[in-house]
């Protein structure tokens, strides 16, 4: 039994087959959501991670949990795996989450559809995650749920284990009420979230959207507000907020609401960037791509990542400023979607077609304007690309935070570089020294990339030094400490006292 149970659909380790045997190892990258969550295991005596595992329909129907013991850099912990069939994974994640919920969360109603959705399957999967968490949680433990595809789990946990403290963290955006209310299951989702003791978001705008939704849909909800921390955005930005909710009061209960923007492992990124082999790789990237200005864009295939708008702006740049032809190059890393993600197929075709059109129209025998990669890059390779790039171009149409922007600032470590960042990315409120742009505006996209290309070297260094200092201060360790403090306030959670394990029978 554990005092902390983390519930996230992804496993905290990689699963490989070597000589016919399954082997498990922790993800090698020290950056991202999974390493950040895994870092909590250093501070508790015992912990559990609940995730899914894909299995046969027969095994999934039995519902027997599978337990693995992991001994890693973050300490020892148990992984509790909820068995799901391929059909259940498809309905829960690829269809309901990505076709119905994802477009609403990211303010893209044109992509919203429920034609293929079986909500009963989504309910059942959430119920299984909830039951698994309740089974392994000690009395009064904190169960920490992550992301929108587990929106229904808090309600089931509250029914099964009233003694537990329930925290929920959104790694995504949270939409305004007029968009959220498109969902036919809005009441069920909101009622479940109101079963939490604590609900977290990256930035004040998304916390405010949630609070206003609860206030509007549930007349008995009262919101407690406070001024926004000055470091969380200057006035006039797309995601600017003057105040943020700190609590909801309903039915005699207080639900804490907070903003905890996750950080990078800045020190690990800086150390990696200084390694001789990574410096050599960065030089090789520049050598392979030729002289001139290197623009880097790292993300994945998703219509909300704004890759089409980015490629169109790049094409306009080469037409508008022909003197740059042969002197600038875009390294575009757009990782292809996993199998089953039908909703992203059109976006991938569009990216490939636009890349081909730009290279066909502007390219020469010795210069290719766009280098497209659709395969994931290892951590060291991403750091080397960041070191090599003169400009990082990160312009999603909507993003809960975007760690890629922070990774670039950490890798440059004050060296000359320019970050062009969408004002609709949550990290934009933290990084005012980025060149901010509105990806919905062709004019602003053109102005932003021009400003980045023409920025004096001294200004590049000054801006990047401030961003590197910020991401180094508010890093992954700071985020971890902040959340631990919130848990202590919520539950009297004593992280220094290991939870007692039950005696063997």
Image (cartoon, rainbow, N blue to C red):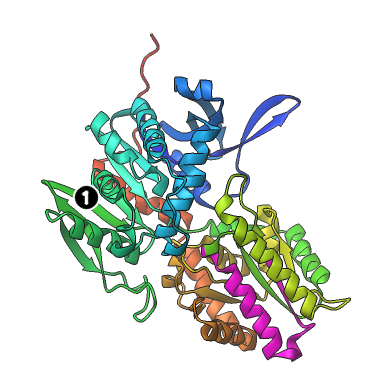
Q: Where is residue 219 in the image (x, y as percent from the top left)?
A: 13, 56
Residue 128 visible at all: yes
Which residue extends farthest front? 115
Q: Quadrant of residue 208?
A: bottom left
Q: Seen from this angle, which residue lies furthest top?
A: 505
Magenta stretch: includes residue 472: no
In screen coordinates, is 197 left or right of 392?
A: left
Front one among 222 and 363: 363
Residue 118 picture location, percent across and down: 42, 40
Q: Is residue 309 magenta?
A: yes
Q: Which residue corresponds to the image point at 14% horizontal and 50% vertical from the top-left? A: 250
Residue at image point 25% right, 49% down:
187
Q: Is the magenta stretch mostly helix, strand or loop?
A: helix
Q: Residue 505: horizontal and vertical position, in percent?
A: 38, 8
* Residue 261 in sight in this render: no
Q: Name the residue under label 1.
A: 255
In the displayed structure, 310 sits above or below 67; it is: below
Q: Where is residue 482 in the image (x, y as percent from the top left)?
A: 36, 54
Q: Which residue is drawn at 45% across and 41% down?
A: 8
Instruction: Give the magenta-colored segment's residue range.
Output: 304-332
> How packed is label 1: few (under 14 Cα within 10 Å), some, or many (20 or more)?
many
Q: Is mark 1 on a helix, strand or loop?
A: strand
């Amino acid at each position: 039994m554990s005092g902390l149970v983390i519930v996230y659909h992804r496993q905290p380790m990689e699963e490989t087959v070597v000589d016919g045997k399954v082997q498990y190892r922790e993800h090698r990258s020290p950056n991202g959501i999974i390493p950040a969550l895994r870092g909590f295991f250093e501070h508790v005596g015992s912990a559990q991670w609940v995730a899914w595992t894909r299995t046969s329909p027969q095994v999934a129907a039995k519902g027997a949990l599978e337990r693995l013991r992991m001994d890693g850099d973050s300490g020892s912990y148990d992984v509790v795996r909820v068995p799901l069939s391929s059909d259940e994974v498809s309905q829960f994640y690829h269809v309901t989450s990505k076709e119905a919920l994802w477009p609403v969360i990211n303010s893209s109603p044109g992509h919203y559809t429920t034609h293929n959705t079986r909500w009963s399957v989504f309910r059942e999967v959430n119920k299984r995650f909830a039951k698994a968490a309740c089974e392994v949680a000690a009395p009064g433990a904190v169960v920490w749920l992550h992301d929108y595809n587990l929106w229904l789990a808090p309600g089931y946990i509250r029914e099964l284990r009233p003694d537990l403290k329930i925290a929920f963290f959104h790694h995504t955006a949270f939409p305004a009420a007029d968009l959220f209310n498109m969902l036919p299951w809005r009441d069920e989702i909101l009622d479940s979230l109101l079963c939490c003791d604590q609900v977290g978001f990256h930035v004040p705008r998304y916390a405010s959207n949630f609070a206003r939704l609860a206030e509007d849909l549930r007349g008995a909800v009262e919101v407690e507000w406070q001024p926004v921390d000055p470091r969380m955005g200057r006035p006039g930005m797309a995601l600017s907020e003057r105040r943020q909710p700190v609590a909801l009061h309903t039915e005699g209960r207080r639900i804490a609401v907070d903003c905890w923007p996750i950080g990078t492992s800045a020190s690990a990124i800086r150390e990696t960037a200084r390694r001789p082999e990574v410096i050599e790789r960065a030089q090789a990237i520049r050598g392979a791509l030729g002289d001139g200005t290197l623009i880097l864009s790292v993300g994945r295939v998703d219509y909300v990542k704004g890759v089409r708008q980015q490629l169109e702006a790049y094409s306009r740049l080469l037409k508008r400023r022909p003197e740059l032809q042969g002197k600038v190059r875009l390294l575009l890393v757009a990782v292809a979607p996993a199998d089953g993600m039908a909703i992203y197929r059109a976006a991938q075709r569009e990216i490939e077609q636009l890349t081909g059109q730009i290279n066909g129209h502007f390219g020469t025998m010795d210069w290719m304007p766009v280098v497209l990669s659709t395969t994931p890059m290892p951590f060291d390779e991403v750091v080397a690309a960041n070191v090599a790039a003169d400009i990082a171009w990160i312009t999603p149409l909507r993003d809960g935070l975007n760690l890629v922007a922070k990774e670039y600032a950490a890798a440059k470590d004050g060296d000359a570089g320019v970050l062009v960042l969408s004002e609709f990315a949550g990290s934009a409120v933290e990084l005012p020294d980025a060149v901010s742009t509105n990806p919905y505006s062709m004019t602003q996209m053109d102005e932003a990339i021009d400003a980045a290309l023409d920025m004096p070297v001294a200004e590049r260094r000054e801006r990047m030094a401030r961003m590197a200092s910020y991401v180094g201060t508010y890093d992954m360790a700071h985020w971890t400490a902040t959340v631990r403090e919130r848990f202590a306030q919520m539950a009297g959670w004593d992280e220094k006292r290991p939870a007692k394990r039950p005696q063997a029978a």
